[in-house]
């Protein structure tokens, strides 16, 4: 398992300014200080941003719980939005179960007052690190397509 200090987000998530707060085999927590670029037309956190935070937190939790250290790919995610987000946001991810091929997770985003903004359930496919995406998004062995 990776430690919180050497966890790497995807380039997309890193560009948002997300930082890892904590990561262990029971949960992950990431933080984002909202900026104008993160907002929707009403001045609140954009829904797609909230979904990205949930996805990143759940994926981190799935990877941290995996004894083999495999990567994960999101298969499906169901999100419920509860209230608008402002200020500093914290996304927490939990991996409730993983099998040899899948991880089943849940996540939540809260504001700096601890109020629940949204929550999600997600299913992730476990992928060996040597696998990569080939043409058309097919999972292939590295070096072949």
Image (cartoon, rainbow, N blue to C red):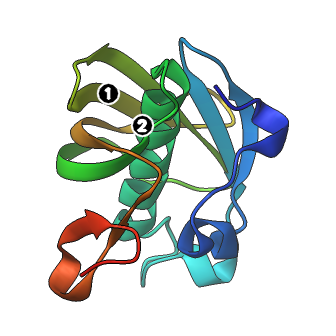
**Which residue bears the numbered disc 1?**
106
**Furthest residue in direction right, as rendered:** 5
Residue positioned 38% across, 21% down in the render: 95
**Which residue bears the numbered disc 2?**
58
Q: Secondary structure at mark 2?
A: helix
Tag 2–tag 1 contact (CB < 8 Å): yes
Residue 17 location (% of width, % of height):
72, 67
Residue positioned 27% across, 28% down in the render: 103
Above or below, comparing residue 60 to residue 134 in the picture:
above
Residue 111 or residue 31, whichever sits in front: 31
Q: Left or right of 34: which side holds 65?
A: left
Total marks placed? 2
The image quadrant of residue 116 is top left
Above or below, comparing residue 43 to residue 139 in the picture:
below
Residue 42 location (% of width, % of height):
43, 77
Q: Residues within 10 Å of mark 2 (few under 14, many from 20)?
A: many
Above or below, comparing residue 30 to residue 129 in the picture:
above
Above or below, comparing residue 51 to residue 133 in the picture:
above
Residue positioned 45% across, 65% down in the render: 49
- Which quadrant of the rendered structure holds the N terminus? top right
- Which quadrant of the rendered structure holds the C terminus? bottom left
Residue 59 location (% of width, % of height):
43, 41
Residue 43 location (% of width, % of height):
52, 75
Q: Earlier in the sequence, mark 2 or mark 1?
A: 2
Q: Residues within 10 Å of mark 1 (few under 14, many from 20)?
A: many
Residue 103 or residue 134, whichever sits in front: 134
Q: Secondary structure at mark 1?
A: strand
């Amino acid at each position: 398992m990776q430690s919180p200090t050497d966890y790497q987000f995807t380039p997309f998530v890193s560009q948002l300014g997300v930082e890892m707060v904590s990561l262990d085999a029971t949960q992950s927590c990431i933080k984002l200080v909202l900026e104008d670029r993160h907002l929707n037309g009403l001045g609140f956190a954009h829904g797609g941003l909230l979904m990205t935070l949930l996805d990143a937190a759940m994926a981190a939790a799935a990877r941290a719980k995996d004894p083999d250290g495999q990567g994960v790919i999101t298969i499906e995610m169901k999100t419920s939005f509860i209230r608008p987000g402002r200020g500093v946001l914290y996304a927490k991810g939990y991996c409730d179960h993983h099998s040899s091929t899948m991880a089943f997770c849940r996540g939540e985003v809260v504001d700096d007052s601890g109020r629940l903004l949204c929550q999600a359930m997600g299913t992730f496919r476990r992928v060996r690190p040597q696998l990569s995406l080939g043409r058309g998004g097919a999972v292939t062995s590295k070096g072949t397509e």
